Image (tube, grey):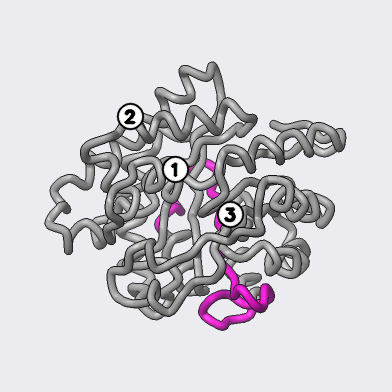
Amino acid sequence: MTKITLLDGSIGQELVHRAGDRPTPLWSTSVMLDRPELVRAVHGDYFNVGATIATTNTYSALRDRLRPEGLEDRFADLIETALREAEAARDAHGGGRIAGSLGPLRASYRPDLCPPEDEAAAAYSELVRLMEGRVDLFLIETVSSILQARGALAGCAGTKLPVWLSVSVDDENGTRLRSGEELSSLAPVMDEFRPDALLVNCSRPEAITSALTILKPLGLPIGAYANGFTRISDGFLQDRPTVDALSARKDLGPAEYADFAMGWVDAGATIVGGCCEVGPAHIAELARRLTAAGHKIV
């Protein structure tokens, strides 16, 4: 028996689907402006099917993403809304943990846009200050380069809460970050900052097993949560993209996704869940499979 932390699945894409609104560059952050109750409902659905962690809807609630939309003055309010809705879902469920999501600055999958380390550290440090005391851990997500990892970890250096770093790898070669850098190049960064866990997210599930093989020797708890996109399209790598530039796979239902995730557990992962296009049904099946295999979900 292994103790497995079961993350939730997609927050952003799930909210986009449920809201049914026209996609915007703000992604799921827009939902919190006029339909925050949807955020609570999504968290609640994941708790109800077995997830033990709610990831806050703060991935794109960042000053540098709000500024072009004229919404930077809503920054603190949006963080507060995301925290409040996650707390309400946890309380209604009667337990669970909350992970404060820290998304990539400026854009996802665009390490070329990454700001200098000191600038990134200041941005993340502000987010940590706003969320500390309301979350149980910080989850740095979709890190695509060594510089991104350094800036985000430096911004979390002052917290006493656990910090998990999650990287995104090349969809065709899981041994490389999306920047093209070798995944093994993270080793000195891990030695310097010592996060509490190291994960892979928002990559095709086929690429993740090879990534975990490289991460495991670094001596930290490892985990994974893949996306369900066919690929990260060229259209999504343009300035201020919207999610309609991405297509969901048709061959990654709950059973197929659970097959991949159980393979990650066999490879040593103790934290699993889902990312974009992986919904409550996927997490429910994964919870069932983990329990049937004799693992304890914590």
- Residue drawn at 52 percent across, 60 percent down: 248
Q: Which of 16 and 203 is in front in this view?
A: 16
SS under mark 1:
strand
Picture quadrant of residue 187: bottom right
The outermost residue toward the front is: 250
Q: Name the residue under label 3.
A: 195
- Mark 2 or mark 1, which has the lower sequence index? 2
Crowding around mark 2 (Cα neighbors within 10 Å: few <14, some 14 to 19, many 20+) is few
Crowding around mark 3 (Cα neighbors within 10 Å: few <14, some 14 to 19, many 20+) is some
Q: Mark 1 points at which residue?
A: 100
Q: Where is residue 32 in the image (x, y as percent from the top left)?
A: 27, 40
Q: Are marks 2 and 1 in contact (CB under 8 Å)?
A: no
Q: Mark 2 points at which residue?
A: 37
Q: Magenta span covers which residues?
A: 155-182
- Residue drawn at 75 percent across, 69 percent down: 210
- Residue drawn at 44 percent across, 43 percent down: 100
